[in-house]
Image (spheres, helix red, strand yellow):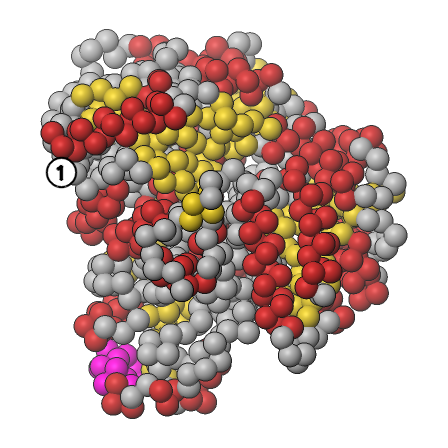
Amino acid sequence: MEQALQQFRDRIASATVTKTPLRIRGGGSKDWYGQSLQGEVLDTRTHTGIVAYDPTELVITARCGTPLAEIEAVLAERNQMLAFEPPHFGPDSTIGGVVAAGLSGPRRQAVGAVRDFVLGATLMDGKGDLLRFGGRVMKNVAGYDVSRLLAGSLGVLGLITEVSLKVLPKPFHETTLRFAMRKTETIEQLNRWGGQPLPISASAWHGGLLIVRLSGAEAAVKAAVQKMGGEEVSNPATFWAGVRDQSNEFFAAGNGHDNLWRLSVPSTTPPLAIKGEHMFEWGGAQRWLRTDADAATIRSAAEQVGGHATLFRGGDKKANVFHPLAPAVAAIHRNLKNAFDPSGIFNPGRMYNEF
Amino acid sequence: MNAPTQSSIPIERQREVVAALRNVLPDACVLFNEEDTRPYECDGLSAYRQLPMVVVLPQTEEQVVAILKTCRDLKVPIVPRGAGTGLSGGAMPIADGVVLSTARFNRILKMDPYSRTAVVQPGVRNLAISDAAAQHGLYYAPDPSSQIACTIGGNVAENSGGVHCLKYGLTVHNVMRVRMVTIDGDIVELGGGALDAPGLDLLAVFIGSEGMLGVVTEVTVKLVPKPQQARVIMASFDSVVKGGDAVAEVIAAGIIPAGLEMMDKTSSRMVEPFVKAGYDTDAEAILLCESDGIPEEVEEEIARMSEVLKSSGATAIAVSQNEAERLKFWSGRKNAFPAAGRISPDYYCMDGTIPRKRLAEVLTRITEMESKYGLRCANVFHAGDGNLHPLILFDANKPGEFEQAEAFGADILALCVEVGGTITGEHGVGIEKINSMCVQFTPKELEAFFAVKRAFDTAFLLNPDKAIPTLNRCAENGKMRVTGGQTKFAHLPRF
């Protein structure tokens, strides 16, 4: 493994000399995510393998190129999981890519996002130095929490070579319920439920149907079913995989005409009046929108309610994929970029044009 | 540390800074007479004291902006301070600096049961949020043991935990948004009302940054439904190894208890006469294992956990039958610190985290250190997440004992790092553990931390000289990692 790291170091050194950007890439399953791809591919899949996993410690440590599928299989053997349910977007997804992309799946609403499960990370910076942040333990406040900062950093700060993630046991029991419900009522209902001690672990609304998953002790799930009503869904695993991996009919139906937008808004935000096809997740906090509406309209609608909008798939990537940053926040971004990647060789322009 | 008094700061400098601050603040919000500033000379780590040059008590964000701009112009370092309950000296003043206290910046701005969020000013007490949310059946989950006094601003600075954080998370998992002012006087929003924000996750790096990156003016916290019921199992073990194994077995059985705490025999013998919690004082280890939720769920989980604890060799098991009994079982654990103060003139609370499976080994080596330093040590353990609090008992009036206690503590922290853990789980580095940072991190990693600080605090004036040691400091203290026979500070001059 030292050899793989040395190769990374050599690539970084020569990229710095020749001023050739490096495009950090695992399985390439999310090449479509973010802004433009620039530079020569730096393939992380020479650095693979699970370094440590002890189920009773609830921590797994793996090198960046380790396939997500391998990690999930190892965890499943011990009845554990990556609770933030990262989307796969294909069989080649790597754990480094999962952390760098920072995308979470349906269970995010109940347990937290990728960043909430990052306990530690090793970063190879623009000088080729390996920097270890965080650790392999649950609680750690020594030094700034740079490891969580790397979740969703899209490789702009450096190459994540290793990560330690908190894992959780799979729930003892799960039931998925279906409700016929309109948009506005759905948002209200999800927020009312959110204020009650109900074991809701996922929610998805589209086309007049609200699907809700309950997870936990059998007694808790059964009591919630009694309270909430609804109709039990017969093939829940397939349904939630379709949401998680964006392979269901809502996401598939885009077929190149529409752009897919992701709106992250306060969960209580009433349905936004933007033309197109809407889907809700995360108790109303994540809204998917298939539309040909223009970017300015969508961004301003998200901003008005205190949220932000991402051009997730399709569209013109040259005009910012991610929501513009406030000037003071952008300044901190620039400073961090300069600190970790002074030559600007890692994934330039993948997050914002200016770095 | 007790050295410099106010007189070592030129009076002209103090006058200059006070005058500038009085230009932007009401006179009553600027303290500089010794009798007024004395209460701010230390935080919960009272062994380290320093009288500040000036104390300011802003009540509005505009005032915070004005204070920061003034201090930046005059190059005055600023130490933000909440309730001053911190245990690592993070709020210890700087002799020629300003202490910015949030004591009067303490209003709950919004309590919204529908979105399950509260917007509060930094000086609001942790428990006051839960108290205000209670009428809606909601509460703020992180519950550091100082929650009756500590403030949310301080919690953000330290990324505070509590006894329930294995299940409910730390501050970083429960704060959605922080509004803060940078040293340049810019107002910055990190996070937001949504579950994420565009760009890098600056909120994640800000939480736990010990007041070194910006001054918090507003915090949006997540509120969660209050569990209908909680019950706790008290289990005795005839060895700490068995107690530690039982914890692992509970986790392996797929259970995440609401609380999972362990005490060694020294601790239970220390607290039992004091609180009469009913602890088995012959047991080598006592485990408290809590379940919460709806009654049916609690019953199911308690049964499952009891079974695991029995098969792991518990010599006795008791389950709380009502809320009064639950609180009684917890009272010993919650009073471990005061009990230490009762049996010993002074105590020093450590805060390392270790991989749980190394617990028995770590406790054995701490026992060996007790003989080496001639001091007793009681161990309480957030067993669920591996956070160990050794309480070193000493008498500061006996010459040399404080120094012995400090050396003992530093040894424990080095041991935590050696077994793959960390020098601080929840109390922060502050001034207390700053030398131990040299053991845990390489010079390049420390440089990276400084770079992060500069990315936010361009003038390097916010709580400087805390948490991150300079390389010279590491070299001077001789605290360094030696890997493969090579010191990591080979490039620095030796003393």
Please say if B220 is above or below A67. Answer: below
Image quadrant holding the C terminus of chain A, namely: top left
Q: Position of residue A298 (x, y in %)?
A: 20, 31
**Mark 1 nearby-residue class (10 Å; few <14, some 14–19, many ≥20):** few
Residue A117 versus residue B323: which sits nearer the camera? A117
Query: Is residue B24 a member of the stretch shown in magenta?
Result: yes
Task: From the top left corner, tell me how far across and down residue A22 is, in percent.
Answer: 20, 26
Q: Position of residue B256 (x, y in %)?
A: 64, 35
* Quarter residue A46 falls in: top left
Position of A230 compared to B246: left or right?
left
Q: What quarter of the picture does the N terminus of chain A occupy?
A: top left
What segment carries the magenta color? B14-27
State the predominant SS element of the stretch in magenta. helix
Q: Is residue A5 left or right of residue A319?
A: right
Query: In the figure, B214 relative to B77: above or below?
Result: above
Observer-nearest of A314 and B251: B251
Label 1 sits on a secondary structure element that is loop
Q: Does residue A287 sit above or below A341 in this rendering?
A: above
**Residue at the spot of label 1:** A354
Q: Position of residue A47 (x, y in %)?
A: 38, 21
Give residue B62's quadrant in the image: bottom left
Q: Is residue B453 above or below residue B66?
A: above
Q: Residue at x 40, y 64 (%)?
A: B495
| Residue at point 42%, 83% (across, down) | B4
Q: Residue at x 72, y 40 (%)?
A: B244
Three-letter code, disc 1: Glu
